[in-house]
Amino acid sequence: MPVTKFQVAEKYDYMHGFGSYHESEAVKGALPVGATSPQKPAYGLYAEKFSGTAFTAPRGENLQSWLYRILPSAAHKPFEPIKRLSKTSFSQPLHHIPNQLRWDPFNTNVNADWTDSLHLVCSAGNPCMKQGLGILIYAAGKSMETNEAFSSADGDFLIVPQQGVLDIQTELGRLLVRPREICVIPRGTRYRVSLPDGSVRGYILELYQGHFQLPELGPIGSQGLANSRDFQIPVADYTADTETEWHHITKFNGEFFTAKHNHTPFDVVAWHGTYYPYKYDLGRYNTIGTVSYDHPDPSIFTVLTAPSDHQGTAVADFVIFPPRWLVAEDTFRPPEFHRNTMSEFMGLIDGIYDGKERGFSPAGASLHNIMSGHGPDAEVHEKASNEDLKPVKVGDGSMAFMFESCFMMGVTDWGLHECKKVQPDYSDNAWGALKPSFDLAVDRKTE
Ligand SMILES: O=C(O)Cc1cc(O)ccc1O
Ligand SMILES: [Fe+2]
């Protein structure tokens, strides 16, 4: 059913429509009409432009918003580096290894807030050149301080919660994001994460390059996969604090800096534009698959894609494996054995992934880097090769996902060693039991 899986009422109001031009005002008349930068904006507000692309990017890609706020974001003391070693630092070496890697569930951390909890697992490219992406794990047990905000200058955050609820106050409005929902917080957006239900854990894809868009639908037609109208955009919501001291922590080339200011960053009374945060409920995904035979490529499960300069090749695809019916006749139904030119980082929000019977657990992960051979484990292969091919529903109560990239991923020291979650015998456990069943006595074809 293409509706939210959540019974809980939405806490906040949203606008709808991926990529649309949106506008919102928390006070009637705060948005200028027929102008963006009047000599004196209404109510004594300051006008501030917030851009996500070059001014001159083509219209279809251009992302810019205008914010009407109590004080501009420039009004802060200088940023100072935060001394402690950041777990997102690029000063740690990246390990490029051809082996298949799998991680046990990452630990939760009751003592960390959002900012402290960010750990870079793997990365390709770098934010200075606006190239590539990073993959992070977050695991936090407490809300950010009341007067604290965070932003990343390095890229757009695609956040995939695995456990717990994120209540995210952004400059452009508020978002409540729960497991099986995702959100995107664009580069530079200031936000504060509080945890209304305790500990949280999940995955982040940080896109150093470009922005996410919906995949083309080609012969599928005008609707399907993730539909534009199901994306939810916050409405303007502000506080009017110009008295208290605030701290703004920013991630800048992987390092953390902090600056003080004596006013809240959440003072945007109205905004309009195309550069904004949004969320999406994965339960609304319109899953498409074969109704005849063979196993289609997982690109049919793409929720969002960030294209490279080469048509059809993504810097990052966000792909999900939602509950779905398998009906293919005379077909090996699970994922095939494969080696790909793309790298594949997978995570599991809940349940069991149909390609792996054991060892791939919720809150765990796997990385099959460029040309690293992988596929169903031996048990899944045995079962799927012999099963009665009735229509079956797979993935009920389950949601796996993949961050797929055209880049070779390097794994950080934290991801490989310090987190202590890498499974030492992954490949043996998954594929060690595969036996040849080729009949050696078969006649070789001769001329
Ligand atoms: O490796 C995986 O499990 C992901 C995946 C799924 C699929 O159906 C086909 C190819 C693929 O990489
Ligand atoms: Fe794969």
Image (spheres, helix red, strand yellow):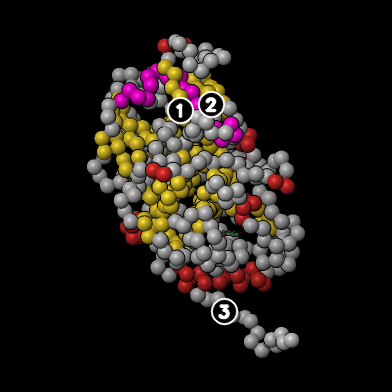
Q: CA distance from mark 3 to mark 1?
A: 58 Å
Residue 307: give x, y in percent of width and height: 56, 46
Q: CA distance from mark 3 to mark 2?
A: 58 Å
- Cβ–Cβ below 8 Å for labels 1 and 2? yes
Which image quarter is the C terminus in? bottom right
The residue that label 3 is drawn on is 435
Q: CA distance from mark 1 to mark 2?
A: 9 Å
Q: Residue furthest left?
A: 83
Q: Is residue 138 magenta?
A: no
Main SS category, magenta section = loop
Drawn side of residue 266 relative to residue 277, left or right: left
Q: What is the crowding at mark 2: few (fewer than 14 residues within 10 Å), some, or many (at least 20)?
A: many
Which of the marked residues, 3 or 2, is nearer the chain's N terminus? 2
- Residue at position x 27%, y 27% from top? 77
Res. 50 mark: 1
Residue 443: give x, y in percent of width and height: 70, 88
Secondary structure state at the residue bearing disc 2: strand
Q: Is residue 360 visible?
A: no
The residue that label 2 is drawn on is 273
Which image quarter is the N terminus in? top right
Segment tinted magenta in the rendering: 59-76
- Residue at position x 64%, y 68% from top? 384
